[in-house]
Amino acid sequence: MAARAMWKGIVTFGDVRVPVKLYAAIEDRTLRFRLLDRATKTPVVQSLVQSDTDSVVPYEATRRGFVTDEQEVVVLDPDELASLEPDGSRTIEVVRFVPPEAIDHRLYDRPYYLGPDGGAGPYAALARALARSEREGVARWAMRKKEYVGALRLHRGYPMLVTLRHAEEVVSLERVERPKGKPLDDAQLAMARQLVGMLEAPFEPTSYRDEYRGRVAELIEAKVRGQTPTAPKPRPRPKARDLDGALRASLRSAGDHRA
Amino acid sequence: MPEAAGREEADARRARPLWSGNVAFGLVTLPVELFPANRTARVSLRMVDEAGAPLSRRYFDADGKALEDDDIVRGFALADGEGFVLVEDEELEALAPERSREIDLSRFVDLDEIDPAYFDRGYFLAPDRGALKAYRLLARTMEETGRAGIATFVMRDKEYLVAIIADDGILRAQTLRFHDELRTPDDVGLPDLETLDAGDEEVAAIERAIVAAAAEELDESLLRDRASARLLALVQEKLGARDDVVKLSPEAAEAPGAAAEVDLMQVLKERLARDDEATGPSDASAPGTDRHDLQVMTKAALYRRAQELEVPGRSSMTKEELVAALERTSEGG
């Protein structure tokens, strides 16, 4: 069951031109609810209303407004907003190729797969060249009236564009001083290191499931069958103790699990 | 009067955690609060009418009668138009047991091993009262070993997979997508790469082009939000010409949005500077929000918090309704 491409573009740098199709790599699995009128069990109608009178304003009569710090509203017409939109170019311009560690992981936002558009030769060559270069491209493109900057990289061997956040979207901690206090206890540090060592493992994404989502699905199924679902019972947590005792007990218990 | 206004302002500027709970590291329990590390950089616009008066969102029934909060219930649509299964907020809250409101670091991994496609959103962890020593110990240990802790936890009606990362003494959290939220090349229907022919000369040509465009650093100027800059330029132009500029009515006025952030820095500074080592780690106390705090917040501050927590129907709520809705929301942790 192949997914539908959401956009087509041409990966461009130097003399290279690779026509590609973009596919969403994220599948939203959140269980979505509709808001219903409790009395009739039918979906509610959402409208924009005048704040003081509650009278409905039809969508055509709405505008966007920018609110200044001086509490003034600058009303922007649809034409004016349209004039700010980027041109409908198909170019995915790769500006630079950098080592992967040059891109802070906090910048990565949404991933999109690239698939071949037309002949698969250039696409396969791009995938192979990217693998050999061990670099990520930094690309710019405009898609659906929005500009993006993204990392061109491989995921499971396939070319992918991961959009990057704007610099202003990542809150910097530069102005926060590092935590201070008495020097940490060497024995405690050694125990903590030992504990991390015992709990060290490769990252296995397949070993985690969204259990809460599963329980919501079960709740819905139980209700469809007309049953009253039972809520899961909390597991008690061992009573807290001082840092030293907690570390010692943790090492013992982690050791038991391994044996 | 000036005194009351001053206090209100101070309260509005206090950052609110999105979540509070415990980080568990073995049997060491570390109470923390979670704050967002991402913000929407795009200049946000409000929906207004042609005269520039801000509009509110309201829910109506099929006959056009306005509905209050209590008249509305969540429904899950059954297949084939078989109607809806009604689900109350309390039922959803009951599905997140105490244990899942804890970030239990049961595994430590090499951060570089995590594929960037998994990364979702960023947060900061601030130590709660009495937790600074354990916080420092965990941060230092993770930094020295170069490992990130992996756990799942529930926040606001959703379960998250999260990597806890030590960054120069500060603990950060980065939510990760669950494996089944990320499609495979096969799911998308991409062709098997093994079967595709790539000409050696073509590969070599692309490799040369990559080398020609190589750089060692990411050029920060590429990350500038150019769309917002263009929008702001248009706004400035219209402000200068006094073109389509109207005064906001006092009821619709909101405090400038930058306040929340000033104070996130303040919260982190306070928490990280507090020398409370004598008290040791506290017990696994139940997470929650200081309810009485909500009463003294300004409406604008309450509204911002409702926005953060995605409280439905917030734009049409009175101050009292916002307080009530926020109390209900924070009950979920």
Image (cartoon, rainbow, N blue to C red):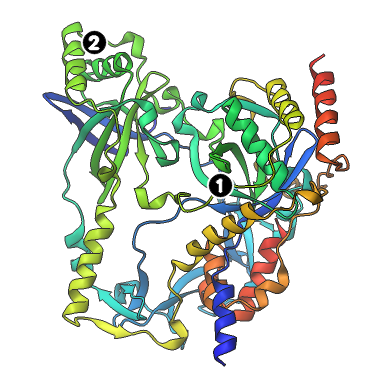
Residue tagged 1:
A178
Residue at position x 62%, y 35% in the image: B140
- Within 10 Å of the Cα at label 1, are there few (<14), some (14-19), or many (20+) other Cα atoms? some
The residue closer to the viewer here, B289 or A180, is A180
Residue B64 x/y as whole percent: 50, 78
Residue extending farthest to the bottom is B1
Residue type at mark 1: give it: Arg
Is disc 2 in contact with disc 1, using a CB cutoff of under 8 Å?
no
Residue at position x 19%, y 52% in the image: A86
Residue B60 has which mark?
Answer: none
Residue A51 visible in the snapshot: no
Residue B198 has which mark?
Answer: 2
Left or right position of A224 against B167: right
Answer with the quarter of the image where residue B185 lies: top left
Q: Indicate the secondary structure of the residue bearing disc 1.
A: loop
The residue closer to the viewer here, B232 or B200, is B232
Residue at mark 1: chain: A
Indicate the quadrant containing the C terminus of chain B: top left, top right, bottom left or bottom right.
bottom right
Residue type at mark 2: give it: Ala
Residue at position x 59%, y 80% in the image: B7
